Image (spheres, helix red, strand yellow):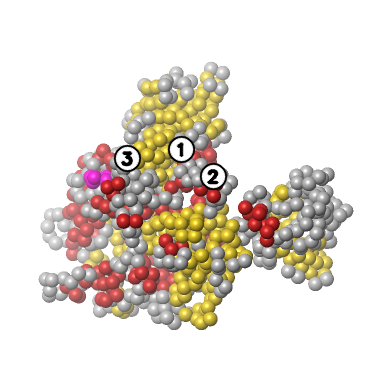
Amino acid sequence: MSSAAQHLLKTFPFKMFRATQCLLKPLPVANGYLISLPANFTTKTPLPYLSTPFKLHLSWSLSSLSPPPLFLKNKTLSSSGVTSDGQTSDSARPGEDNTVVIKEEELTWQNQEISGSYPHVSDWKSNGNSDGGGAKMTITAKPSITDSGLMVGGRVVCNRVAENLVVSPESSGSAFLGATSPAPRSRHVFNVGVLEGYRFICLFRAKFWWMIPRVGKSASEIPMETQMLLLDVREESALDDENSSDMTSESTFYVLFLPVLDGPFRTSLQGTSENVLQFCVESGDPSVQASQVLEAVLINSGDNPFELLKNSIKILEKRKGTFAHIEHKKAPPHLDWFGWCTWDAFYTEVNPQGIREGLQSFLEGGCPPKFLIIDDGWQETINEFHKGSKLHIDGTQFATRLVDIRENSKFKSSGSESSCIDLHDFIQTIKERYRLKFVYMWHAIIGYWGGVLPSSKMMEKYNPKLAYPIQSPGNIGNLRDIAVDSLEKYGVGMIDPEKIFHFYNDLHGYLASSGVDGVKVDVQNILETIGKGYGGRVLLTRQYQFALDESIARNFKDNSLICCMSHNSDSIYSSRKSAVARASEDFMPKEPTFQTVHIASVAFNSLLLGEIVVPDWDTFHSNHSTAEFHGAARALGGCAVYVSDRPGTHDFRILKRLVLPDGSVLRAKYPGRPTRDCLFKDPVMDGESLLKIWNLNKLSGVVGVFNCQGAGNWPMKDAEAVPVLASTPTFLSGHVSPLDVEYLDQVAGDNWRGDSAVYAFYSGSLSRLSKKANLEVSLAVLKCEIFTICPVRVLGQNLQFAPIGLLDMYNSGGAVEALEHTNHPAGCRVKISVRGCGRFGAYSSKKPLSCIVDMQEEEFQYNAEGGLLTLKLQGECSLREIKIVY
């Protein structure tokens, strides 16, 4: 008997009598479940008292005997239909289907001594002698509070729950947590209960701008500013095999806490030293107060962590209406092309001549970018604190303010041969000469770091005024940030929220008229600190975000916006249209201990961010000691691929593993995220765990394995509490399995029998594995391996085949677009559509007779021992048709 069933019996005791079996099999529908009772259903079936509320569609067929009464508050469901206050409606007749729709009410079964046996919470069975068939009923119990315990999916997640905690059922087995207070305030900290003994992964803002992950086993390890908490509540027997890739067994169960926005209040999670889980709600405006919040934290549960996150975000999308799931947004086209960003190449010293030199050096190396981001340094700004002084006080640089929406003098004619007339002339020239498809410009959400200059004649129509940021206790409770601390002192030139759309529209309109295709909008979290007097942080952020979305839609095509420094939940849950956002702190080429932290941060942050935006992994340097590491991660990140190389400083060997000759990239379908068996492990500091990141292509999966140990430390993590770097092994070993790829069956086709061809990029080895088999991988620090995992299709009686893709590209399988086959008496023909050129490879169980590429027969090589078939795709980088004849 399961522990859930044992708990149910203790909580709801009842007598056992002769059982009459029946079948109660619920079908999930939009608002709950449809349960059909067959015509031979009798009254003598046990229905124990269950007080957990849940939504239900009830349909039954009647025999001459009535089903036992079901009580719905003051309504009684009976064989004669729905009875309410003595009135009968929807009369039911024996043998006919009758439907009662129950929406928000609380349903309880009547406790009575009738025949039958106990049910499980999620598996209701009756096993006595019977004249009917088997019996089974599945009910998803919503989170609730029982005996001072927070129950989720039949399990106690938190003990000693606070008396003022409120649970409000929501759709699909989820619920909201809220709480009440005796007095209204603008900031509350509410206790949930004691949380301990479950492994967790949380995402929290260690710095003002950015989230990072943390793993642990009790609430005391949950930092302030936590914005996602995922628990592993598997039964003890399953915890004994934590290293297994097979995390899909019946014992696997996950509980998700998502602190969200409730009206003008924003929520975050945190833990205490006594292992009490808390949630903090705050408005950011002393005048915006409340004594209760009822929808502060969404709780949901399920057996698939990725589906759980997706479904939960969709529940919030429907309920809140303030943001959209990524499936309902338009992704900008720059994501599919190689790009160059000027930031690490020039920082704020960017200029037209340097940009030309960079584009030319890429072109000469055979890897021309197709999109360009002209980052910080092109705008007309002023810093009043730097006037007349050669000594600049540290931090005053962030008080620099915008004085005009037009470009600065560097991008205007100065009479020299290398200059340009203006921004329009410059962009037109580089687009024509270097065949750029997209040019993006950088700006801050408030104009510039320090906002706009209130005394500027060009800015006065936006009614700007100086505002002084106020950080919340959560901000200063983790790591302080010099930029925000400086702006607290020197102020921000804030545009009137009523005028913000006009500012964006004027700025973007001017850029669009100059040939600009989109914008990267930075410094977004700053809005949470200046909400005083404007309805608070949530409402101000929403007003700015909605205005930004509308201006982008009006002035640019294809939703061409990259959001940056936007990791607070105010921005995340106000993202209606923006479809791309930076997923971690910057790539820092001069910080050797930050490289592994960067990779791991993006992968884990993408668990949450990837349901709302396409995570942007930021730039990297192709000519850097960690370039292979970063390049491989971006190849399977499902993201844009762009670098920030200085002109003439490139490693084209690495770039050509990412970029096809036409400038396009082989982008995977989903955000790159950790595999299930990595979710609750620390791949940076535990000294033993490798990081595995999975993704999917059109016909295959891909898993990247990275050794991030011993090369960096998490911020706010005590290095002495984990294995010291000197004790970290030179090599770490782990396993890779087809099970690591979620949804692999969705791309496998009907003729898949469970085996996969697994190709390792660096070693060049090809293996055939069953679904649950695995390969061992051993990696040195800052080394990686990429495995293309392609389902083996049975295409004929004697032929098994798997198209791997372009073997010299990191994401080999991203090149394969389609596969068809035809069987003839003389043999089989396989047709593959492949994008790009280079060395193509496939697994084949036997040697083909010939290979034809675009109607021309080509030479091929076949290794009978491993089944690797290779051939060269010559010529232009286009969609190629390969026919393999057997």
Q: Which residue is mark 2?
A: 248
Residue 623 in the magenta stretch? The answer is yes
How far apart, in angstroms, are the residues tagged by discs 1 and 2?
13 Å
Q: Which residue is mark 3?
A: 731
Residue shown at the point (42%, 55%) measured from the top left:
215
- Kind of residue at disc 1: Ser
Magenta part of the chain: 622-627
Query: For the residues carrying marks 1 and 3, which lies nearer the camera in this image?
Result: 3
Q: Which residue is mark 1?
A: 737
Q: Is residue 297 left or right of residue 518?
A: right
Residue 666 in the magenta stretch? The answer is no
The answer to whether residue 29 is visible is no
Q: Where residue 231 sits in the image (x, y, percent)?
A: 50, 56
Residue shown at the point (18%, 45%) measured from the top left:
648
Q: Is residue 244 above or below residue 526?
A: above
The answer to whether residue 125 is visible is yes
